Amino acid sequence: MRLPVLVFVCCTLWACVVRPHCAEAAKARHFKWEVSNMFWSPDCEEKVLIGINGQFPGPTIRARAGDTIHVELKNALHTEGVVIHWHGIRQIGTPWADGTAAISQCAINPEETFTYRFVVDKPGTYFYHGHYGMQRAAGLYGSLIVDVAKGEEEPFKYDGELNLLLSDWYHESIHTQMVALSSKPFRWIGEPQSLLINGRGQFNCSLAAAHTTGAKQCAAVNRQCAPVVLPVQPNKTYRLRVASTTSLASLNLAIGNHKLTVVEADGNYVDPFVVEDIDIYSGDSYSVLLTTDQDPSSNYWVSVGVRGRLPKTAPALAVLNYRPTRASKLPALAPPATPAWDDYAHSKAFTYRIRARAGTPPPPSTADRRIELLNTQNRMDGHIKWSINNVSMVLPATPYLGSLKLLGLKSTLAAARPAETFSRSYDVTRPPANPNTTVGDNVYVLRHNSTVDVVLQNANALAHNTSEVHPWHLHGHDFWVLGYGDGAYRGDAADAARLNLRDPPLRNTAVIFPYGWTVLRLVADNPGVWAFHCHIEPHLHMGMGVVFAEAVHRVGKVPKEAVSCGATATALMAGDHL
Ligand code: C2O
Ligand code: CU
């Protein structure tokens, strides 16, 4: 009986030795999860979604920086594989625990169990979600919140905390959606039926009917879609953690009569700034501080609306409930209106204001390499695809990590590497002159510890006068967002002048605005194979992504169960070593 205790003490002491600021031993936190399909009514219409341990959204993981998370994940879906990705966690030293099907691991088969073991090294607001097919859009997600290590403090003060996990919801199953997106002729999935806050929304009725003429008041409803109530005490400061796992929608959040102070973005502190509302793209997370300094005899609406696409989805509402006012007392003020969906000036003003908090490590002053990625919408044999430098990503049967690490030169991946640039004569303001594209595995090999700049270039889609927002998310890293611009990136002095090397924010998700470009800088210091893709689920499904393979020879021993599929399974059977 003594042994486990001893092992635990040893491990935690060791953890203290390697982490300089370790005030108190970091913990191992164990979770046992079962993923299954279940009936649920997220917006009061009953559907089948993917839940965890009978819950939707999945259980919130709460840990302290330095803790090790163990999730024993059993796949109880009847006929499909599953994986879970820990969005924003860098997986330093554990790239096989990143939870990306066909990239970092094989999908877990029905009835099988896979254990994710990883360290949450940095405090912040994160989340987790399915990363196989479109399972995120089927409801497979939840919050992951990391507090500062014991004995350390956040660089801002607050009295209480509220968590808002935002998502969008479709009534069609993801199977129908995936068939639609890959059929000929192409069928678009359309806009979501509802927006959800903490997994709850209301379809076809409004909680604020009194304020919105014509809308019908939501009837008394079942618990699964009951309005979210955020209880607060007057004259206090709250930290709102807001994250978006939406499939498609870009969102904007505002709270009636209250200003918001942005203090964190994607697990990194930002130079605090005050706004009326915040934009949140899929894959983003923020912490904002809110002071309850309004009339305490009233409640206030928290309103979440659609940005960047002509909204066909009603805003999601929650009630900021000033105690002891009853939660059921309807706010006197109408819910704050979302800025016009195409008011990109508003979006840019918000995004450009995000700067690193003093003390954030600055980027290296120069880069060793520049990778330019042109985002286009294309055709292929009657299908519609999204491509990067005219190659649309298709995931191989053998996970990239196993393939590169175990099979090495015999890797199942294409020998030819994708292009690192695109023609300077490409006209980003028009549909592609040659709309045809091909598919590929899109692996960029990064040299260990090299500094890489990535230019994400947006362009016109297939339809005239159409260019969409794409939030790009990188696994395994934070990157510095050096700057944004409109039109084609030229890399000339004028573009260089738009880059911020002084206090660029560190993030894991960055948006490209319509017809614009965004420049990121990262240091390839985390051996592994990392997905880098548009976080819009249907766009990723249509090929909008690449993979960064980083110093794979330095990756430690990959657990066999992570890569026992495809060609790596054969190699393992033949006794090759990982
Ligand atoms: Cu949150 Cu690869 O995604
Ligand atoms: Cu996209």
Image (cartoon, rainbow, N blue to C red):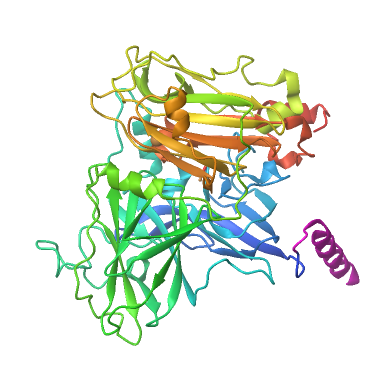
Residue beneath the point at 64% across and 56% down? 122
Q: Which residue lies furthest to the left in this view?
A: 214
Residues 555 and 76: in front is 555
Q: What stretch is highlighted in magenta?
A: 1-21
Magenta span has 13? yes
Residue beneath the point at 34% across and 27% down? 487
- Classified by dominant secondary structure, the portion drawn in magenta counts as helix
Quadrant showing the N terminus: bottom right
Residues 306 and 482: in front is 482
Residue beneath the point at 83% across and 29% down? 575
Asked if 67 appears above or below 447 in the picture, the reply is below
Tell me if I can see residue 209 in this picture: yes
Magenta span has 316? no
Quadrant showing the C terminus: top right
Residues 109 and 250: in front is 250
Q: Residue 81 appears at what percent x and percent y? A: 56, 42
Q: Residue 354 appears at what percent x and percent y? A: 45, 50
**Residue 12, picture quadrant:** bottom right
